[in-house]
Amino acid sequence: MNRNFLFITLCLLFSTSSFAGEIVLKGIYQGKNLFIMNPFSPNGGFCVTEVKINDHKINDDINSSAFEIDLSTHQLKLGDNLVVVIKHKEGCMPRVLNENVIKPSSTFEVKSLKFDIKTSTINMVTTKESGSLPYIVEQYRWNKWVKIGTIDGLGEYESNTYSVPVTMHSGVNKFRFRQRDFSNEDRLSREVVIRSPVRPVSYEPKKPTTSITFSAETDYEIFNSVGARVLHGKGTTIDISGLPKGDYFLNYDAFTESLKKR
């Protein structure tokens, strides 16, 4: 009885010391391998005890101070989802040197980009996406690119189709898609350019005191003389009664004009 108890206790102690935790990496296979720094364990031997790729134990040699996880031998296709589990002993911690190689990156290529004037939608087909990343939809107005929406990227390598409804202002309209990944750099689609049939918006009075009324609903922004945005929104009227008297800049429709509040 005592011998059995002692044997079970020793087994439990050995199990605890040989496996104390795990590192789980989730990402996308992009044709590159992972490199692991593998320190010694205080209990002897190297820190890493086991590595699994998508729930399959790898047969690579992990008994060294640094080793490579060769992802190319696991029948993965570019863009496949990837889960890497690195089990390790207590009192030590392996280090993944290049985790970024399995993070979704912005690699999309635009196959087609068209504007459907009947439905007022932008239709984009992409290929070679390396994981799901959001797209920011932008419209050029007021001498700058303005964010008008966000859609989730589908992340498929072969083909992805998107349809985004947009609102046009008067005159020439430009739209584009922008995507940013872990590198913090933007990847841009080409621009869609179309002339709108929408009539230009006007407003009254030109020297307002309490409010501004537009001839049609429009997006708008008001900036003060030092460049701080003080009002913005969408509508047919703006209540400016709370603004101090002075000089402002008014963005509306496709126009930017100076504005003096009395």
Image (cartoon, rainbow, N blue to C red):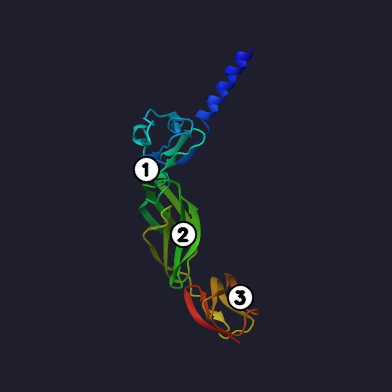
The label nearer to you, 1 versus 2, is 1
Q: Name the residue under label 1.
A: 30
Q: In what quadrant of the picture does the C terminus appear?
A: bottom right
Determine crowd level at label 1: few under 14, some 14-19, many 20+ residues with C-alpha closer than 10 A. Answer: many
Pointer 1 and pointer 3: residues touching (CB < 8 Å)?
no
**Earlier along the polypeptide chain: callout 3 or callout 2?**
2
Going by the numbered disc 1, the residue's amino acid type is: Gln
Residue shown at 47% from the left, 41% from the top: 26
Please tell me the numbered disc located at residue 238.
Answer: 3
Residue shown at 46% from the left, 59% from the top: 137
**Earlier along the polypeptide chain: callout 1 or callout 2?**
1
User: How many numbered marks appear?
Assistant: 3
Going by the numbered disc 2, the residue's amino acid type is: Val
Residue shown at 47% from the left, 76% from the top: 255
**Which of the 4 image quadrants contains residue 187?**
bottom left
Q: Please, what secondary structure does the residue beneath circle 3 have?
A: strand
Going by the numbered disc 3, the residue's amino acid type is: Ile
Q: Name the residue under label 2.
A: 137
Q: Where is residue 8 in the image (x, y as percent from the top left)?
A: 59, 19
Determine crowd level at label 3: few under 14, some 14-19, many 20+ residues with C-alpha closer than 10 A. Answer: some
Residue shown at 46% from the left, 35% from the top: 86
Pointer 3 and pointer 2: residues touching (CB < 8 Å)?
no
**Earlier along the polypeptide chain: callout 1 or callout 3?**
1
